[in-house]
Image (tube, helix red, strand yellow):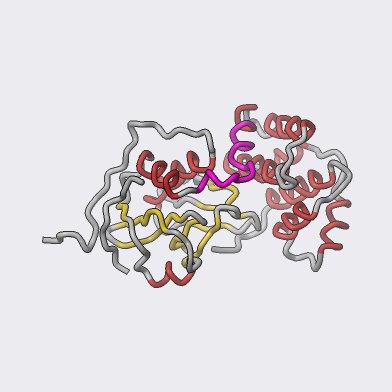
Amino acid sequence: MAQVQQVDLAPGGEAPHTPADDALAVLLASMACSDGTIHQSEVEFLRKVRRDLPDDAAIEAWALSCSGPIDLQGLAAKMRSVDDRWKALRFAARMAWKDAHLADEEQAFLIRLAQALGLTPLAVDRVLREMSPDEGDRFTADRILKVVLEAHWDAVQLASGALCSEDLISVTPPRAEVVARVGLDKVEVMALCTEGLAARFQDGPQFIAWSELVTYTRSSHIGEALVLHTEDDRRFALVDQRLAGLAIVLDHLLDRHGKPRADNAPVVKMLRGDDDE
C-alpha cells in the first residue's frame, strides 16, 4: 500500500424544506410502488426521507398515495439548480437499487427522468454505477489511497496515521480504519476511512458512512463550501471552500470504473509535527 507522508496534525444538519425536497420525496415514493410491492429496504429508505411519519404503516400509506404516473416536467420545474437535478437523479438511482436488482423498467424510467431534468443518458450510466450496491471492493484502503493521491487536491495537506483531533475522534467509530487525514493550514479537518469520512462541518463534527452518502453539491456561488447529502436528506456543509476538491475524490471513489486523470497528483505539504525549523 502506498504511503501518505506520516506527520502530526494539531488537534450536519437540517436545512429549510423546499419545493424540490417535496418533489423528490414524491418521486421516491412513486418509484417504491412502481412494481406493485414495497420492499422493506424501500420502506427503510422512505422512512429516512419522511422522518415526520410515525411508523412503517404510515410510510406505506403515504407511498401508496403517491403511486401512479409522475409529471416529470412538473417535477423538473421544481428542480431549479443543476445540483438539485443531479441530486434527484442520484436519489432515484439509489432507490432503484434498494432491492439489489435493477429492472429494465427502472432503467428506462431513469432515462426519461434524466431527459426531463435536462441531463443526458450518460448521466444515468454514471449514477447507476455510483449508486450500485458495494460489493466490498469500492472502499478498500488501497483504493481510497490511490484515488486521493491521484486526485487534484493541492489546497490541502495529507497525512497518514491515527486521528489526533478529539472532536473527530469522538464521532468516528472506534474500529474505523483511517486511510488518509486531511489538513488545512496544518490543522486536521477531515479523515477518509474505509467505513466513511469524518469531518468538521459548519454544524460541527460528523461521521458519514459511505453507505449513507448519496450526493454532494457544488454551489454556483464562488467561495461557498461543498455540501454533502445523506440518505435521510440531511446536508453537511464543509468548513472551508478549499475542501471542495473532495468532490473530485468522491467522483472517482463512488464510480467503481472511474479513473482519475494521471496528471492530477496533489501537492503534499509539510504539516505540524514535521521539522518546523
What residue appears at the point 46 percent right and 72 percent down from the top-left corner?
170
Which percent across, then down, holds residue 7?
26, 59
Q: Is residue 69 left or right of residue 208?
A: right
What residue appears at the point 41 percent right and 42 percent down from the top-left corner?
147
- Give the camera-side residue of 247 and 176: 176
Identify whether 85 is placed above or below 61: above
Which percent across, then down, holds residue 120?
63, 27
Quadrant position of residue 272: bottom left
Give the quarter of the figure containing the C terminus: bottom left
Task: Please report the bounds of the magenta region as a residue range.
Answer: 125-139
Residue furthest top as drawn: 121
Q: Is residue 63 left or right of residue 91?
A: right
Quadrant position of residue 102: top right
Q: Is residue 229 left or right of residue 260?
A: right
210 is within the stretch colored magenta: no
- Give the camera-side residue of 55 and 155: 55
Quadrant position of residue 79: top right
Identify whether 69 is placed above or below 169: above
- Give the camera-side residue of 151 and 144: 144
Which percent across, then down, holds residue 73?
75, 35
Residue furthest left as drawn: 277
Q: Is residue 160 left or right of residue 168?
A: left
132 is within the stretch colored magenta: yes
What residue appears at the point 39 percent right and 55 percent down from the top-left corner?
240
Which percent across, then down, holds residue 12?
54, 63
Total numbered circles: 0
Identify whether 186 is placed above or below 165: above
